[in-house]
Image (tube, grey):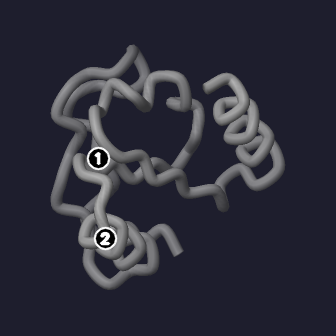
């Protein structure tokens, strides 16, 4: 919704690199927020994926995935964080 996008935009403006957005579902859904520096994309919205996303953000394991499709010119298929990158 417009309200959600405005909320995310305001958070990004205030927090910048500290903001981590967890997006669930279809990867094309992140088009509108592709300006956010740290996006964790999961394909399911359930307790298991939410828990795993939080564990990843805080360094319990490293990234082993990449964006499967091109979302826009800035987010091309194969885009990935470095395997040894921890967000926090």
Kindly identify the residue that appears in the image at 83 percent across and 50 percent down.
14
Kindly identify the residue that appears in the image at 55 percent across and 31 percent down.
33
Q: Position of residue 62 (x, y in %)?
A: 26, 72
Cβ atoms under marks 1 and 2 closer than 8 Å: no
Figure quadrant of the N terminus: top right
Q: Which residue is mark 2?
A: 47
Query: Which circle marks residue 33 in the picture?
Result: none
Query: In the image, is 39 to the left or to the right of 71?
Result: right
Of the image marks 1 and 2, the number of the one nearer the N terminus: 2
Q: Position of residue 35 (x, y in %)?
A: 58, 31
Number of numbered markers: 2
Mark-to-mark CA distance, 1 and 2: 24 Å
SS for callout 1: loop
Query: In the image, is 21 to the left or to the right of 86?
Result: right
The 10 Å Cα crowd at callout 2, few under 14, some 14 to 19, many 20 or more, is few
Q: Which residue is mark 1?
A: 80
Kindly identify the residue that appears in the image at 75 percent across and 48 percent down.
11
- Direction bottom: furthest residue: 60
Image quadrant where residue 18 sits = bottom right
The 10 Å Cα crowd at callout 1, few under 14, some 14 to 19, many 20 or more, is some
Query: In the image, is 6 to the left or to the right of 5?
Result: right
SS for callout 2: helix
Tell me: residue 80, above or below residue 75.
below
Q: Position of residue 88 (x, y in %)?
A: 53, 75
Tell me: residue 17, above or below residue 1.
below
């Amino acid at each position: 919704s417009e309200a959600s996008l405005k909320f995310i935009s305001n958070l990004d403006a205030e927090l910048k690199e500290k903001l981590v957005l967890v997006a669930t579902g279809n990867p094309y859904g992140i088009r509108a927020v592709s300006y956010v520096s740290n996006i964790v994309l999961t394909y399911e919205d359930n307790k298991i994926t939410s828990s795993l996303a939080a564990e990843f953000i805080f360094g319990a394991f490293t990234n082993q995935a990449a964006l499967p499709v091109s979302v826009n010119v800035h987010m091309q298929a194969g885009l990935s964080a470095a395997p040894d990158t921890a967000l926090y």
